[in-house]
Amino acid sequence: MDVTVLDRLLQIGELFERDMATHFAGSPLTPQRVQVLWELARGGSCAQHELAARLGVSPRHVTTLVDVLEAGGYVRRSPHPTDRRSIFVALTATAEDTMHEMQLDHEELSATLLEAVAPEDRAAVERGVTAIAERLAELVAADEARRREEARADS
């Protein structure tokens, strides 16, 4: 059986998961918790319900994630500056330092991985990976919408 692009993408995903598990062993960080930190680092502090929307998870789920991150000293909660019904979530100074280091590590790893590709092919690889990610996001969104519609029709 031939190895497909999907096989390679799944292999890459598994290798990244193994690397993250090793890297964060002994810490309270998991891939989902790191995703919360990345979102706050990239998109800035926000209301907790907005963070849930940005991550595409339920408010209850983000509450659980933020609880653990707050206990670990990665985020802090405070009253929202303009909406007293909302809770504002922000990275702590320690987490900002951690995310800065992660960003540097990501840039270094990205460069290291691209070194495996001939220099004249790197731009094409980057375009291809971006196109695949965008197409997969479209397919997932369409499938989620279809499932929601089916659930509504069944109820």
Image (tube, rainbow, N blue to C red):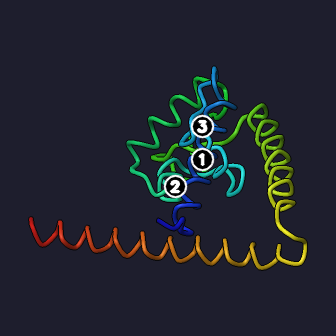
From the image, tell me which residue sits under label 2. 55
The Cα atoms of the two marked residues, 2 and 3, are separated by 20 Å
From the image, tell me which residue sits under label 1. 35
Q: Amino acid at mark 3?
A: Ser
Q: Amino acid at mark 1?
A: Gln
Label located before the other in sequence (2 or 3): 2
Q: Are marks 1 and 2 in contact (CB under 8 Å)?
A: yes
Q: Position of residue 111 (x, y in %)?
A: 86, 57
Label located before the other in sequence (1 or 3): 1
| Within-10-Å neighbours for mark 2: few <14, some 14–19, many 20+ | some
Q: Which quadrant holds the C terminus?
A: bottom left
Q: Are marks 1 and 3 in contact (CB under 8 Å)?
A: no
Q: Which circle marks residue 69 in the picture?
A: none
Q: Are marks 2 and 3 in contact (CB under 8 Å)?
A: no
Instruction: Tell which residue pokes out farthest to the top in this image.
Output: 26
Q: Is residue 34 left or right of residue 137?
A: right
